[in-house]
Image (tube, grey):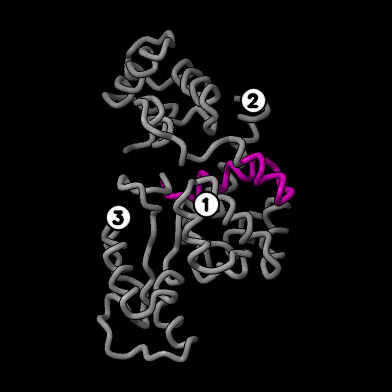
Amino acid sequence: MITLRQGDRGADVIKLQAMLVDKGFILVNDGDYGGKTTDAVRRFQQANGLIDDGVSGVSTMRCLRGDDISKSLKKSDLIAAASALNVDLAAIYAVTQVECNGYGFLDSGKPAILYERHIMRRRLLAKKLSAIGYPASLVNTQTGGYVGGLGEYVRLDEAIKIDRECALESCSWGAFQVMGFNWDLMGYDSVDHFTGEMAISEGKHLDAFVRFVGSRINSAMLKALQRKDWAAFAKLYNGLNYKLNNYDTKLAAAFGWYVRLLTGGL
């Protein structure tokens, strides 16, 4: 499902406008995602507790269709996260936009994951288990082997046959793609407790992000987020290659946009 925002044009925008009209909004189905469409989308989001940025993503479209949105991230989740981390609300909006790869759940209802075969090798060795003799797609010194979607669960299921705990720890989970091996650091009772929470909602995904950034070893990351030092935050959260995907500039631009949105400047 594509994301639509102000400035977009075409048949998908016409479909969106028609759905909004069916909900009682007064719009011309002209295929132009302009200010009036943005305002209608935002008012619909506000009425349903969704993130009210005027951008029509997966959760907004699901709500317009009448689908269940109980797992969707809500504005109240963002407000709680900003309070817990003592950061600007616009910063949480920005991180959510840039760091989340769309909806945190698959169509099947399972949380989105990526199985990391190189992490599996490390976890096995950390438990003093053999990391030799397994398929390269499951245990490897190198990253890769991704198939995406439900295919990642196929890889996970095979890895569980090797060692359940290591396999669950070797996946990144949910909208914010937090690694399973961080469960103890984030204050969960076990990796099963963590993954069980990830199956509940995107709000729980954000809670994992809050726990991770607010953990005892990530004080520098939290301070970078609090002072809006996007290069420092991206380096610590996304890794040394953060500039390859322009995470810092994307975060800075998103933060500026959300500041204007939240203060009525848009």
Picture coordinates of residue 124, whole percent (x, y): 42, 84
Q: Which residue is found at the position 67% from the left and 54% from the top? A: 225
Residue 141 coordinates in the image, percent (x, y): 37, 83
Give coordinates of residue 202: x percent, y percent. 49, 46
- Are the residues at dot 2 and dot 1 in contact (C-beta closer than 8 Å)? no
For label 3, the crowd category at 10 Å Cα-Cα, with few meaning under 14, some 14 to 19 and many 20 or more, is: some
Q: Is residue 205 visible?
A: yes
Q: Secondary structure at mark 2?
A: loop
Residue 227 lies in the magenta stretch: no
Magenta residue span: 78-102
* Residue 246 visible (yes or no): no
Q: Report the front residue among 70 and 234.
A: 70
Q: Amino acid at mark 3?
A: Gly
Name the residue that disc number 2 marks: 265
Q: Are marks 1 and 3 in contact (CB under 8 Å)?
A: no
In the rendered view, tell whether residue 111 sits above or below residue 215: above
Taking the image as shown, residue 97 lies to the left or right of residue 158, namely right
Q: Earlier in the sequence, mark 2 or mark 3?
A: 3
State the separation of the CA atoms marked 1 and 3. Answer: 17 Å
* Residue 108: percent from left, percent from top: 30, 47
Q: Which residue is mark 1?
A: 205
> Residue at left 35%, top 19%?
19
Residue 79 lies in the magenta stretch: yes
Task: Give the structural element (helix, strand or loop) at label 3.
Answer: loop
* The C terminus lies in quadrant: top right
User: In the shown orientation, is residue 255 left or right of residue 197?
Assistant: right
Q: CA distance from mark 2 to mark 3?
A: 38 Å
Which residue position is annotated with label 3?
149
